[in-house]
Amino acid sequence: MIEFRLDRRSGVSPYLQLVHQVRQAIRLGHLHPGDQLPTAREVVEQVVINPNTVHKAYRELERDGLVEARPGVGTFVLSSLSARQPAQDPALRSRLADWVAAAVQSGLDEDDVRAVFDAVVRDAFEKAPERRRPGVA
């Protein structure tokens, strides 16, 4: 089961943080079709958030076709986001972990590492048009 966390300093709305965390868990293979998401009540207790925020996040995931709400039963994952599970590639993860460790050792903090990583990813996808994310021109 997914454990949510909120970064109240991130500038990203709490409902979007929940959406992003579910999407990431699905993409990495931590959540699979048929898995149940925590109830709104469980999320409220876990991260101290308004229940309407949880419902908003779950509705967005449902509109995207990733989850299905079953009244009286819960919310369940419907599909995956990746044909290939990146979490299952130990060599790739190991190389990335080595890079992050080197970046931290060189004095970069978490925000610096994310900024460099995001810039490199953005550059790589701009140079490879066939690998662009959907909806990105």
Image (cartoon, grey):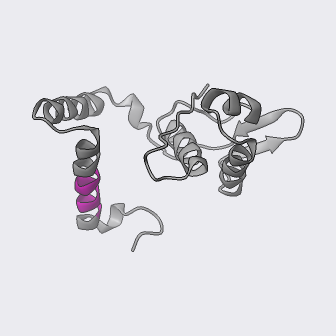
**Does the segment drawn in magenta span residue 65?**
no
- The prevailing secondary structure element of the residues shown in magenta is helix
- The answer to which image quadrant residue 100 occupies is top left
Percent across and percent down for residue 3 are 57, 28
Quarter of the image containing the N terminus? top right
Q: Residue furthest left?
A: 106
- The answer to which image quadrant residue 85 occupies is top left
Percent across and percent down for residue 81 are 53, 47
How many marks are shown on the rendered structure? 0
Residue at 74% over, 36% down: 40
Is residue 115 toward the left or the right of residue 135 in the image? left
Closest to the observer, 129 or 26: 26
Residue at 31% over, 26% down: 90
Q: Relative to 13, say whether 44 is above or below.
A: above
Q: Residue furthest bottom?
A: 137
Is residue 86 toward the left or the right of residue 41 in the image? left
Closest to the observer, 72 or 50: 50
Closest to the observer, 1 or 27: 1
The magenta-colored residue range is 118-125
**Does the segment drawn in magenta span residue 124?**
yes
Is residue 112 toward the left or the right of residue 20 in the image? left
Percent across and percent down for residue 93 are 29, 31
Q: Relative to 46, say whether 70 is above or below.
A: below
Percent across and percent down for residue 102 are 13, 32
Residue at 70% over, 57% down: 63
Residue 96 visible in the current orientation: yes
Closest to the observer, 64 or 118: 118
Quarter of the image containing the C terminus? bottom left
Residue 37 visible in the current orientation: no
